[in-house]
Amino acid sequence: MYVDLGSALDATPGVSRDSLERLDDQVATAHDRIEAGRNDHDHGYAALNLPARVDLDAIRSAVAPFADAEAVLTVGIGGSGLGAATLANALAGPDDPDAYVLDNVDPEHVARLLDSLPLARTAVNVVSKSGTTVETLSNFLVVREAMADAGVDWTDRTLVTTGESGNLRQLADAHDLPLLSVPDGVPGRFSVLSSVGLAVAAIQGHDLDAICAGAADTADGLSGSLFETPAYAYGAATYALAARGATTNVMMPYAERLETFAEWFAQLWAESLGKDGLGQTPARALGATDQHSQLQLYRAGPREKVVTLLRPTHRPDRPIPETDLDGLSYLGGSTLGDLIDAEFGATEASLAASGVPAIRVEIDGVDERSLGALLYGMEAACVLYGELAGVSTFTQPAVEWGKRAARGLLGGGDVPAAEAVEDRASLRIDP
Ligand SMILES: O=P(O)(O)OC[C@H]1O[C@](O)(CO)[C@@H](O)[C@@H]1O
């Protein structure tokens, strides 16, 4: 992962080189805390030890029964779905089993997806660290029933990844299902480089060693200076920009295969840093597509954004055919890759021209090693940002209120939060 802060230097809000040099002392101190947390395998920091600790052979043997799969259905939400989806969508090859994620409880969507799947040749990858997440468990019950209705023995088609206790572990033990553990001390949104994110990649036949090697390279490169560590440069610059008013971070990959990565990044950034009235709101965009929908706002709207422009520097290409169509002959001899790279550079320059900070993030390609480096790099960037901001990066207490209320509304116990839902203020305008 390569990071270029050039287009964030003289922007408004912006960071000067001097301010980054002053901030680098805090980065050194934060790095020491991060290293201490890693050495003690403390909660959260333990995620940054995964490249060296994940048991790839255990993952390979757990997924071995699914070598015949034509489709992989991950039933998991948040960090229990986004990691697997990011790797699957980025690395999917023409002969790989198709990968799907059931991470919502929209009944019509669930029914349509199940109707479209070859259930007898589908591997069901049910993932929940807590083993209690109602959306995941409800969806799994529906999937299991659909398999039974289709005459498919779900115990032959199901892999479970979960924590040390909970409903799913009991179910796996009761039916002797292939079982993988969510490593201790690793929050969901930091678990992509564990069995949580790697099981589907294994079923699809991707090179797990290369993914972990890319991550390990980035881990080995962590140092006490942002000027030597791209991940820390990204974390420190986004932190400094947020402190100066850039409270929205637009993650804009210039590759369709990285679109789901932007979703993964959104959970990482929002759930880790959104605390104590602080945080930087992640927004997902796609380049070049959203140049034609969002860029107007980024350039001429409220000055509260930094735009992260992400691209692979090497990708398969396709020539643009010669044409005599008016105004297009200049494209003769160019490729779509030339065009999207020109758009990338032009968008960065257009943001700089209007004083909007942008950060360029590049990876060598959309391949296993580069993805391992990118995912680990963004995790380390997030941890550093959290250290600098002084927030508790590895918890997410604010999500519990809504869960309790929903449970109360469904009769899952007498919950005051549910009453608050009933008593909500309303100013309804009917047509
Ligand atoms: O893996 P679990 O326990 O099902 O949780 C799923 C997701 O829900 C959250 O706890 C938020 O509600 C996320 O942090 C987590 O990634």
Image: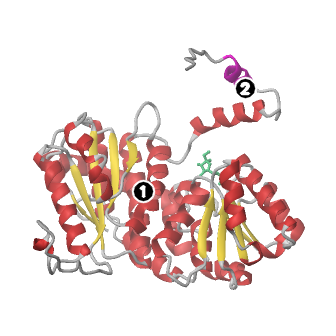
Residue drawn 42% across the image and 56% down it: 262
Is the C-beta separation of discs 1 and 2 under 8 Å?
no
Which element carries disc 2, helix, strand or loop? helix
Query: Which amino acid lies under the numbered mark 1 shown in the image of this protein?
Result: Ala
Q: Is residue 417 above or below residue 177?
A: above
Q: Position of residue 368 (x, y in %)?
A: 44, 78
For residue 51, the mark is none
Residue drawn 84% across the image and 73% down it: 152
Which of the pair 186/315 is nearer the observer?
315
Residue drawn 84% across the image and 72% down it: 155
Q: Position of residue 43 (x, y in %)?
A: 57, 53
Which of the pair 64/338 is nearer the observer?
338
Which of the pair 35/302 is nearer the observer?
302
Q: Residue tagged by mark 2? A: 418
Identify the image's colour scheme: rainbow, by chain, secondary structure or one colour: secondary structure
Q: Residue tagged by mark 1? A: 262
54 relative to 357 in the view: left or right: right
Is the distance from the Cβ of mark 2 to the nearest ligand 1 atom less than 8 Å?
Answer: no
Q: Position of residue 331 (x, y in %)?
A: 15, 73
Q: Is residue 27 visible?
A: no
Residue drawn 65% across the image and 72% down it: 72
Q: Specify the segment rendered in magenta.
A: 416-423
Query: Which one is earlier in the sequence, the residue at label 1 or at label 2?
Result: 1
Q: In the rendered image, which quarter contains the C terminus?
A: top right
377 relative to 344 in the view: left or right: right
**Residue 420 lies in the magenta-colored region:** yes
